[in-house]
Amino acid sequence: MRKPRWWAELSLIGVVYAAYTGGRLLVRGDEASAVDHGLAILRLEGLLGIDAERPLNRLFTDVPALGVPADFAYATLHYLVTPVVLVWLFRRRSAHYRAARAWLMASTLLGLVGFTLLPTCPPRLLDAAHGFTDTMAHFSAYGWWGGEASAPRGLGGMTNQYAAMPSLHVGWALWCGVMLWRYGRTPLVRALGVAYPLLTTVVVMGTANHYLLDAVAGAAVMGAGFLLAPHALRAVDRLRGRAGTGTGAEAGTGEAPPVVGGGCETFAGEHIPGQRSVATAADDTSTPAR
């Protein structure tokens, strides 16, 4: 398997990310159904006793030393760490890059399906009576964002704020963590592989951008993408194989190349092949000299 070309990989990732971003904007659900889905998640978490978002959000709001760094982490790491890990795999672990990239892309596209089927209002956009504070709006004086998620001020219309289920912040962080743990060669890199997805999960809940079940769904999407990726790679390889047939006599047809010289054989002392077949030549050599 030849090493992927960097420019082809960059183009492919750019196209997929643009399709994913455009898809998020096109599948915006209506506000009423998104709020209903968000409240349903809260009720389910309450029944299960796993509604950890409120205490974390209250802590991040009351302690700026936690809330402000968490806001910066939410606004940046998702878009920085994942590309860095991809480049690291491409340059240092190229044998594993293609499978890892396929896993990430398959999971991302599955996440888009989730946004389409279940538009969900994040905790920060629920009515204040539910007890959540949008920390990014609360601490907006410290960063470039406004009151519309991590988008820069004035560009909130370029994001789908109801794309909360599943949390691909958590999903991508989990992918990064697995890559660092599996292919890292030092204890520090592997420790970062464990810490990063855990930290991301705490951040997305503490900033009121996601519910705990959003994070669980993000991990589940990554699991499904992991199972789907090998099949996607085999399908791509089959398509490439079919595209390669018919380009030449030897291109994937299994046929032997044509015999040069039309079956004639050159004997010692001959500069030009004599017009005798191989079979005839064999008969000549078997005939005793007189």
Image: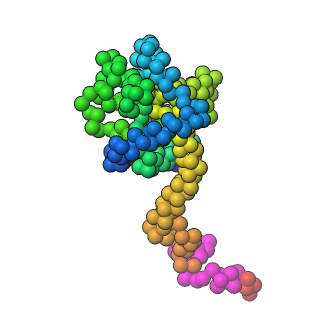
In the rendered image, which quarter contains the C terminus?
bottom right
Q: How is the image coloured?
A: rainbow
- Residue at image coords 56%, 55%: 231
Query: In the figure, 132 relative to 265: above or below?
Result: above
In front of the other: 231 or 247:
231
The stretch drawn in magenta includes residue 43? no
Is residue 27 at all visible to an observer of this figure? Answer: yes
* Boundaries of the magenta span: 264-285
Query: In the figure, 258 relative to 20: above or below?
Result: below
In front of the other: 61 or 235:
61
The spot of residue 58 in percent (x, y) is 46, 19
Is residue 270 at all visible to an observer of this figure? Answer: no
Secondary structure mostly taken by the magenta-highlighted segment of the chain: loop
The spot of residue 26 in percent (x, y) is 32, 48
- Residue at image coords 35%, 18%: 139
Which residue extends farthest left? 154
- Residue at image coords 50%, 27%: 53
Query: In the figure, 47 relative to 77: above or below?
Result: below
The stretch drawn in magenta includes residue 267? yes
Which residue extends farthest front? 129
Quarter of the image for residue 10 reads: top left
Decide if residue 115 is on the left or right side of residue 223: left
The spot of residue 210 in percent (x, y) is 46, 33
- Residue at image coords 46%, 23%: 57
Quarter of the image for residue 25 reads: top left
The spot of residue 152 in percent (x, y) is 29, 28
* Count of marks placed on residues: 0
